[in-house]
Image (spheres, grey):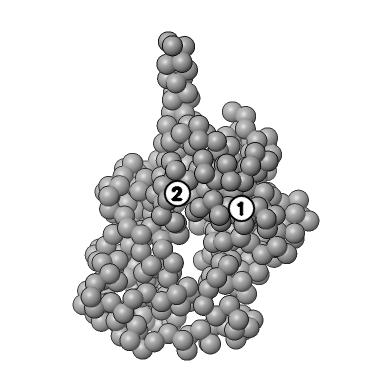
């Protein structure tokens, strides 16, 4: 298959696979697509380990790294990373802390033991995202993606100086144009069906709007609710040069998704997700659970802005996962979850995507020929 992105990166299939799991990233790249590692949950030291492993296991195939450097977030003016955490923590209201503790107690979730506090801030800010970019650019990555807003212009310039293409996710045409103005090479037009941070415009509407807004010189990838070959064909028909996928890799053999959460994903339908601010403070699509419903209830103090919300709940999420609580445990995932009902190797998912894509194109060609 030949599109501008397959020629640009030297890959066989225009399928980009976002995952926080290095095994999935390497498997998809070896299968002919491009794996993209989500760097958010890793410290710079941990990211170095993950990327070194991928370098050794990707078989010389290209891969990418995705960071989160939001254009707007609480505390953007509070200084460098050494001071940022403590100052942000002081901004979290006691009312919100009590609400989280009461919710956990209601479900019998025990406090943490000797393991201590986890990673509260992660790469949700410019100050914490830049070290991840520095690590990524020390490796032979082919793509650097930014998940929230246009990346800083100097970061785009750094990537280009290393021969790395830059991608940015956009949920409307105006955001897409801003990305192009910042020097971004590839726009990921992500519809509301997507998992994680997403806007409120559907993929079917969004992709052609973005394609028209950025012009023919900018490559666009379709994203949001894409997990079947027919949906790949639809994205291409709308003007995209490839597709960006994420949720479907949560249930492949190589994924490190906890078994209890994986089983919930396998049982879920496309109606079992909701856009909620209860994870990071920005709208993100995730499984509808007792957790998301609690944050929408009358008792809720309301989610905090990014990055305060995740700082508030980071230890609570660890406690929930450790306890195995089936009612509170949730996971960012898109509406394609309704089609995620089998565990398969990542390579098989890639090949099935392309096989069904070919079938869809042949069907359309047959209809055209009949006319």
Image location (x, y in percent) of residue 220: 58, 43
Q: Secondary structure at mark 1?
A: helix
Q: Is residue 130 left or right of residue 282?
A: right
At horizontal 25% and vertical 81% (from top left) the residue drawn is 102
Answer above or below: position of 355 versus 30: above
Q: Which residue occupies the foreground of this view, 129 or 297? A: 297
Q: Residue furthest right?
A: 161
Image location (x, y in percent) of residue 334: 38, 51
Task: From the image, tell me which residue sits under label 1.
Answer: 177
**Residue 195 occupies which quadrant of the picture?**
bottom left
Task: From the image, tell me which residue sits under label 2.
Answer: 191
Answer above or below: position of 267 versus 146: above
Image location (x, y in percent) of residue 2: 62, 29
Q: Secondary structure at mark 2?
A: loop
Q: Quadrant of the C terminus?
A: top left
At horizontal 26% and vertical 67% (from top left) the residue drawn is 293
């Amino acid at each position: 298959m030949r599109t501008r992105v397959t020629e640009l990166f030297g890959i066989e299939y225009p399928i980009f696979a976002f995952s926080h799991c290095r095994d999935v990233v390497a498997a998809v790249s070896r299968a002919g697509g491009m794996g993209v590692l989500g760097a958010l949950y890793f410290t710079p030291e941990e990211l170095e380990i993950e990327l070194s492993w991928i370098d050794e296991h990707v078989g010389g195939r290209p891969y990418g790294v995705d960071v989160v450097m939001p254009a707007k977030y609480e505390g953007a003016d509070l200084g460098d990373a050494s001071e940022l955490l403590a100052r942000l923590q002081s901004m979290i209201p006691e009312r919100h802390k009590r609400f989280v503790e009461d919710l956990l107690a209601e479900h019998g979730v025990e406090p943490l033991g000797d393991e201590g506090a986890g990673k509260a801030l992660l790469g949700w800010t410019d100050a914490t995202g830049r070290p991840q970019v520095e690590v990524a650019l020390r490796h032979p990555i082919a793509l650097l993606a930014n998940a929230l807003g246009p990346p800083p212009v100097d970061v785009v310039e750094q990537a280009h100086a290393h021969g790395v293409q830059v991608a940015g996710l956009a949920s409307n045409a105006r955001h897409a144009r801003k990305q192009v103005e910042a020097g971004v090479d590839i726009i990921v037009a992500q519809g509301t069906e997507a998992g994680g941070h997403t806007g409120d415009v559907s993929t079917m509407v969004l992709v052609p709007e973005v394609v028209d807004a950025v012009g023919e010189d900018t490559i666009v990838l379709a994203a949001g609710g894409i997990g079947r070959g027919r949906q790949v064909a639809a994205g291409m028909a709308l003007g995209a040069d490839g597709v960006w996928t994420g949720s479907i890799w949560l249930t492949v053999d190589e994924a490190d998704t906890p078994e209890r959460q994986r089983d919930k994903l396998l049982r879920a339908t496309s109606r079992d997700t909701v856009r909620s601010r209860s994870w990071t403070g920005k709208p993100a699509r995730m499984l509808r659970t007792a957790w998301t419903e609690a944050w929408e209830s009358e008792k809720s103090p309301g989610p905090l802005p990014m990055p305060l919300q995740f700082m508030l709940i980071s230890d609570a999420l660890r406690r929930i996962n450790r306890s195995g609580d089936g009612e509170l445990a949730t996971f960012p995932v898109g509406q394609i979850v309704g089609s995620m009902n089998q565990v398969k190797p990542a390579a098989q998912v890639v090949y099935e995507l392309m096989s069904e894509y070919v079938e869809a194109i042949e069907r359309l060609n047959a209809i055209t020929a009949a006319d």
